[in-house]
Image (tube, rainbow, N blue to C red):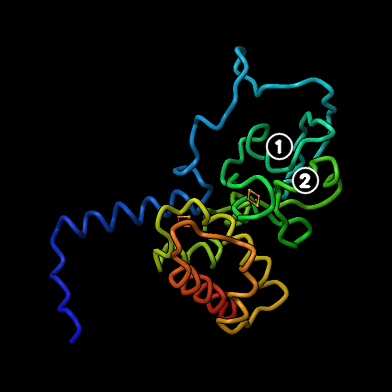
Amino acid sequence: MPEMEEPKTSESQAQQITRRRFILGVIAGGAVVSAASYKILAPGGRGRTWGGERLITLNVNGKPRRVEAMKQETLAWTLRYKLGLTGTKLGCDRAECGSCTVLIDDVPYYSCSVLTNTVRGRKVVTIEGLAADDGKLHPVQQAVVDEQGFQCAFCMPGFVMSAVGYLKKNPNPTREEMAQGLSGNLCRCQDYTKILDAMMRGAETMRRA
Ligand code: FES
Ligand code: FES
């Protein structure tokens, strides 16, 4: 027999509101989850450099960004520590978890496994670049807020970027197809059912727009 749901107290409602705010903060740019301790700063306050850097221009989130990058520097590193786009997470740093996923020319890539130098002249989009200029969230982002589909949310930007990329080639996926499309992303909290709910809801909203 199903258990009866407990009536919501004002305390549990307050927790839900707080959680909703938390998700909103992460989904719009990873601001909440980003740990300040990730940022490695030299005494002068600038990102640490190792020498051998070269000034290049990247197209990130629709804007030209000038940045000094080493030959062997990964895009994830550049985005997070040089350009301050900390919504892109670094989990495994070896192409296994998908938390660093960004779009390059509309295709999802693990940015921990792409050299920054190779994306010159290409269009890079991170989680920070998904919302409209007026702040309106992308339908997939909004669906995550509505479904509250993640626990700690560390993996969320990667899942969202993978879903947005996948939906560009398959706008009307079955649940199984969407799961397959997101199979390169891992969630340590194992919240896959709710994540899929959110992504399918985002897909539906996009079709109705
Ligand atoms: S951090 Fe890039 S795949 Fe895990
Ligand atoms: S919700 Fe915690 S890692 Fe996915």
Q: Position of residue 24 (x, y in %)?
A: 43, 54
Q: Which residue is mark 1?
A: 78
Q: Nearer the viewer, mark 1 or mark 2?
A: 1
- Which quadrant would the C terminus be assigned to in this image? bottom right
Q: Nearer the viewer, residue 10 or 156?
A: 156
Apparent side of residue 55 relative to residue 165 in the rendered image (left or right): right
The secondary structure type at the circle numbered 2 is strand
Of 57 and 40, which appears nearest the observer? Answer: 40
Rendered position, 196 above or below 74: below
Residue 184 location, x and y as percent?
Answer: 64, 63
Q: Position of residue 125 (x, y in %)?
A: 69, 53
Give the residue at x 46% y 64%.
144
Crowding near the residue tagged with mark 2, few <14, some 14–19, many ≥20 C-alpha atoms within 10 Å: some
Name the element at disc 1: helix
Q: Position of residue 169 (x, y in %)?
A: 73, 75
Q: The disc labelled 2 sits on which kind of residue?
A: Asn
* Circle 1 crowding by C-alpha within 10 Å: few under 14, some 14–19, many from 20: many
Residue drawn 65% across and 72% down? 181
**Residue visible at 64% across and 20% down?**
46
Q: Which residue is mark 2?
A: 59
